[in-house]
Amino acid sequence: MDDQQLSTLEDQPKARILLVDDEPGIRTAVQAYLNDEGFDVLTAIDGEDGLQKAKQFMPDVVITDVMMPQCDGYELLRQLREDERLGGTPVIFLTAKGMTIDRTQGYQAGVDDYIPKPFDPDELVARVKNVVKRQERLLAEAARFADTDVGQMAKQITEIKSMLTQNDSNSSRKDLVIPSFTPREASVLQLVAEGLMNKEIARQLETSIRNVEKYVSRLFIKTGTSSRTELVRYALENHLVT
């Protein structure tokens, strides 16, 4: 490997892993395994501590034990999925439970992978790497689609605004029932109408591209539209954006 390749690897940010487990021995061992593989590992002693550190540090992956006092793995997962900034974060359950019904319950709750204790260190590392790579592929694909035809869409938005300005009296239907939007949906709608790409929206709202895609999909469903241009037209015609 030459100096340029080495420099490129050194410049790449490490994937940040949040490890949540109430057993000090497990935390120490797993942290050591993952540190040796080049991950940046943060630890938390229980679900409540884990949630606070997740909000503070925005990890790429959360590995959490299931059986913990006060806030267990399922409750932590639920709160992560409900958080607008953390909802798309991959979560791996690390637990002594190995029965099929327990694994099924974990997947139904929205967990991304499931590693029963006792675990093989190599398998643990391989599963974490797999989840990280899968998340990187999803984000890269979302970013690629977000960049598609942005210039053309900006032109269409300008044309729509011009048309509505010229014919403002007929720009909305009086009998149309406008759906209600959450504050975050309204924010995404405004930024879409401004012609921003998904990665730009994610940056402004301090969330992930994956979450932006989720909100855009919800807006399509609520407004009965099927493209960003149709969505912008709908929003402008009904004075939902400025």
Image (spheres, helix red, strand yellow):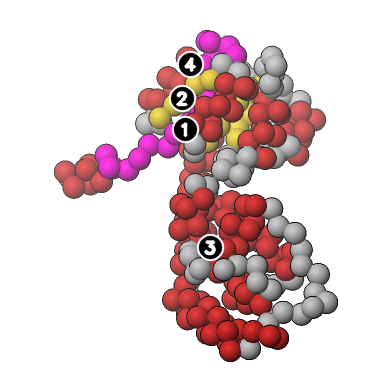
Q: Which residues are magenta?
A: 9-27
Q: Tag 1 or tag 3, which sits nearer the N-term?
A: 1
Select label 4 or label 2 by which is in front: 2
Q: Tag 2 or tag 4, which sits nearer the N-term?
A: 4
- Name the residue at 53% across, 20% down: 44
Select label 4 or label 1 by which is in front: 1
x, y (%) of residue 19?
53, 24
Select label 4 or label 3 by which is in front: 3
x, y (%) of residue 110?
69, 40
Relative vertical location of residue 170 with respect to residue 125 in this rendering, above or below: below
x, y (%) of residue 228?
59, 71
Q: Tag 1 or tag 4, which sits nearer the N-term?
A: 4
- Name the residue at 59% across, 51% down: 211
Q: Which residue is outermost to the right?
A: 175
Mark 3, residue position: 191
Identify the amino acid type marked 3.
Leu
As measured in the structure, the alpha-carbon distance from the residue carrying label 4 to the one carrying label 3 is 44 Å
Dividing the picture into quarters, in which one does residue 179 lie? bottom right
x, y (%) of residue 117?
63, 20
Assess whether mark 2 and mark 4 are in contact (beta carbons under 8 angstroms).
no
Mark 1, residue position: 57
Assess whether mark 1 and mark 4 are in contact (beta carbons under 8 angstroms).
no
Toward the viewer: 215 or 143?
215
As measured in the structure, the alpha-carbon distance from the residue carrying label 4 to the one carrying label 1 is 21 Å
Mark 2, residue position: 42
Q: Tag 2 or tag 3, which sits nearer the N-term?
A: 2
Assess whether mark 1 and mark 2 are in contact (beta carbons under 8 angstroms).
yes
- Residue 93 shown in magenta: no
Mark sitting on residue 36: none
- Residue 16 shown in magenta: yes
